[in-house]
Image (spheres, coloured by chain):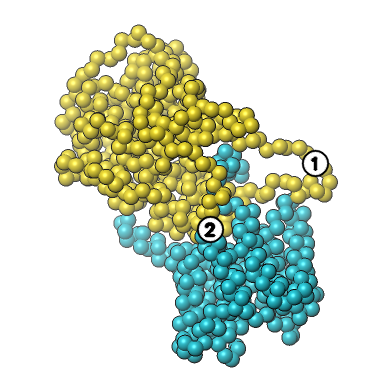
Chain colours: A cyan, B yellow
Amino acid sequence: MTGWLLDSHLMQQRSGWTPARVTLAQLVALVVPMGVSLAERGSAQIAVLVTASITCLVWELAFDLIRGRSLSFHTVTTALIVSVLVPATVPLWQIAMAASFGVVFGELVFGGRGYGIVSAAAAAAGFLVFSFAGAGLSEPSESMALATLPGAVLLLWGGLISWRVLASAAAALIAAELTRQGASGLPTVLATAPFGLVFLVSDPVAAASTQWGRWVYGVLAGLLIVLFDTLAGSAIAPAAIVFASLLASLFAPLIDHVTVTLIVGRRGRRHG
Amino acid sequence: MLPWFRTEHARLPEQTVHDGAPVGRIALLGADLPGLRPKLLCEQGSRIKRGQAVFHDRAHPEVVFASPISGVVESITLGPRRSLSALVIRRETGHHEPDPVKMAMSSATAVRAALLANGFWPAFLTRPFGRIPAPDAAPEAIFVTVTADNPHAPDPRVVLAGQHEVFAAGLKALALLTDGTVHVCQSQGADIAAGLGDRIRGAFFSSGAASGLAGTHIHRLHPVGWGRSVWSIGYQDVLSIGRLIETGIPDCSRVVAIVGPRAKQPRLLRTVAGASLQELIREETVTGTGGAPLCVLSGSAENGRKASWLGRYHHQITLLDDAPKPVNTPERGVMARFRRASSMPAPLVPTAALERALSLDVPVVPFLRALSVGDAETASRLGCLEMVEEDLAAVSLACTSGADYRRMLRHVLDELAEDA
């Protein structure tokens, strides 16, 4: 396989993304939301963070040992997202179970990050809500929404998340909320949705990977969020975003397939 | 793409043409001629004149490859599967240079015969497949690339300054080879191809990523596919053809930009196609940081190849610090298992950065996935026939996988060309 790799001099002066740089950028983007969640929920949240991180790293270590690879620390981003989503009231063993399920069945069994089909953090959060009675996700606050912004800007600028997904998901969400409740609920929607939209729905591995497909995927995710939202009032239930993200990413390959068929058809007409 | 990840901050070349150091040896390279099997017309030690054929294509004996200088054949090395690796010619002075002949270039057959006989036919590359066209083929259009494919390349307007008549003669000759249009693709500015009839048309491309690549021009103006074929040719080759018509002398001189962090003074040099880079850059380098060895690329930093000879289609020489060799010390124990190089090729993370890197209207991620598994049929449905290697250089650099999609594309194109 070495014949298919870039030359060493090209690798050296590569200005683009490598898996390690992707991890690094996502970690940087997650630093501020993590800080806000620690500040809001106090020291109990540290236990959540440590539990999630250790669980994720142990699983990654195990898989890397079996596969003979070097440790990539990708799963730390998953651990950070999970510990922002999960409140400190959930027992730590439940968090460990959920994080295990997320990293193992969300990405590691497929070969690691970039090979899976869903966002590992969404899989972990979904598992937690489904499996344990009474385990809920924490309600995002306004300051969490603000804290998401710098990371979102960084990821958008680097091209790690697509503005098409973000814009279409937000537009679908806002339009559906407007028809449901009118304009009064909008500020609450805007405060509760951003973290999930940026770090779960827009995950490049889970989202659709064609330009038109990203629009469709975003709209689908936005509508599913409204559909799954069980809370009365205008706040978005965090679980709704998690399940919408999971379901939408299962549809992403189908969306891509249809998009590619359309593009090929158009090319056929244009190129004769 | 994040700016702090960019490692090459090289100065732009000074856009004035200087005479390069005289080179004593040139080479005709097999690396420029993928899939070509040569039939040699000379042997080691033969004396040859400028413009004399040294080998021809086994499949098309009319397509000859001519020597750009007069001299002695120093060595001929063959590569795998009877392909050519390099044919090196040493310059000998005091040779009788061929006499200038005024050529009659009024008919299509005369132009075709003159270009074939003087070794200018390989200047054309077909699209699809990026190969030298068959001697009797007629393209639907000809694309003259008068754009620089990156900011470090020579500015075509500087190279062509004062030679517009010669260039126009070359363009008129090209127009005889096709019933379609000759598209003269250039950057914004005065039309170089103005007033040459309605079949020679100027097309303007604003600067930006990939706007200098022939693939982008063809995609916008005349998309190709199965059964639709166009040719592309570089502006310096059109200039050479113009000179052949005006003077009768086959002139293969090239203006190349010498750039990169190790270039003493980035500028334009006049030399000859296939020139020995070692001789050309002897006075042009500076010592690297920490005594790093020099890495000489024929072509741009993005798209070039490590070479000791200037490539047939290259207008640029990039001098870089060589990458340090990976230290390979065997380790034992548990920790050794984590110090291995990360698995390669790495996964393809479908980031939006990939779309920015490919300017053609192609679904990038499905396309790259098809290339990675060598699925020629899907790749051709998604548009690989519109591309050659240079179009995928930026994507290869932007992708997380670290795979060289150019080589994968060549593999797929070769497979498709055999079916065609």
Which residue in the structure is indicated by mark 2? A158
Chain designation of label 1: B
SS under mark 1: loop
Could you tell me residue B105's position as x and y percent? 18, 29
Give whichever of B202, B348 is nearer the camera: B202
* Picture quadrant where residue A42 is located: bottom right
Drawn side of residue A266 relative to residue A2, left or right: left
The reply to whether discs 1 and 2 touch (Cβ–Cβ < 8 Å) is no
Residue drawn at (55%, 44%) of the image: B7
Q: Is residue B350 above or below residue B131?
A: below
Mark closer to the observer (1, 2): 2
Could you tell me residue B188's position as x and y percent? 29, 47
Give whichever of B125, A206 is nearer the camera: A206
Drawn side of residue A132 relative to residue A144, left or right: right
Residue drawn at (40%, 23%) of the image: B20
Mark linked to residue B331: 1
Give whichever of A8, A158 is nearer the camera: A158
Mark linked to residue A112: none
Could you tell me residue B364's position as x and y percent? 47, 57
